[in-house]
Amino acid sequence: MTTRTVIHRQVEAANAGTLARVVARLPSGWAVLGDPQITRGYCLLLPDPVVADLNALAGEARRQFLEDMARLGDAVLAVTGAERINYEILGNVEPALHAHVIPRHADEDPGLRVKPVWLHDWASAPAFDTGVHAGLAARIRAALG
């Protein structure tokens, strides 16, 4: 039996048109804004179909996922003016492939800017809000082409 994860449910919602955080459909899956927005423009790439991890993809499917991840990072970098983009594929909490695309900004707390984003205060980060973040999603979508 396959474990149903948050990633599975988000991909199902994206396909149904009910996931408000969708930025764009890419060849390998869905680009979505993160919730919360731990840094401005934080996104995830969710594979469609969902697979367990990067090693479950081979050949063209693996290449496409990694290319889409970098392409999403390029778009987030262009839109947010971040200093850099961090990329993380973890899967420890949600055991399904998904890539975190994390812009790092010069105005982050200096004590946190050089540390993993997981050390930020996620509870006080701005929650995704369609009214607030729709423009950001549209700008990233446009940068993706």
Image (cartoon, rainbow, N blue to C red):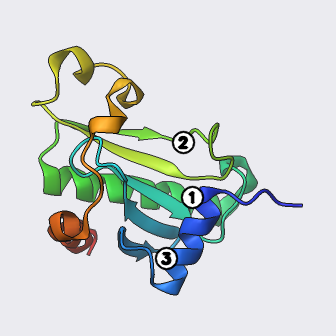
Query: Circle 1 is placed at which residue position?
Result: 63
Query: Circle 3 is placed at which residue position?
Result: 14
Around disc 3, counting alpha carbons within 10 Å, would you say few (fewer than 14), some (14 to 19), or many (20 or more)?
A: many
Asked whether residue 85 is in view, the answer is no
* Residue situated furthest right in the rendering: 1
* Residue situated furthest front in the rendering: 123
In terms of sequence position, does the residue under pointer 2 or pointer 3 come before the other? 3
Around disc 2, counting alpha carbons within 10 Å, would you say few (fewer than 14), some (14 to 19), or many (20 or more)?
A: some
* Mark 2 in CB contact with mark 1 (< 8 angstroms): no
Around disc 1, counting alpha carbons within 10 Å, would you say few (fewer than 14), some (14 to 19), or many (20 or more)?
A: few
Q: Position of residue 133 (x, y in %)?
A: 20, 64
Q: How far apart in space, not on screen, are marks 2 and 3 (Cα)?
A: 20 Å
Q: Quadrant of the C terminus?
A: bottom left
Q: Amino acid at mark 1?
A: Arg
Q: Quadrant of the N terminus?
A: bottom right
Q: How far apart in space, not on screen, are marks 2 and 1 (Cα)?
A: 15 Å
Q: Nearer the viewer, mark 3 or mark 1?
A: 3
Residue in front for this viewpoint, 75 or 36: 36
Tell me the element at label 1: helix
Residue in front for this viewpoint, 1 or 79: 1
Query: Circle 2 is placed at which residue position?
Result: 89
Q: How far apart in space, not on screen, are marks 3 and 1 (Cα)?
A: 22 Å
* Mark 3 in CB contact with mark 1 (< 8 angstroms): no
Q: Quadrant of residue 110?
A: top left
Q: Position of residue 109 (x, y in %)?
A: 16, 23
Q: Amino acid at mark 2?
A: Ile
Q: Nearer the viewer, mark 2 or mark 3?
A: 3
Residue in front for this viewpoint, 120 or 88: 120
Tell me the element at label 2: loop
In terms of sequence position, does the residue under pointer 2 or pointer 1 come before the other? 1
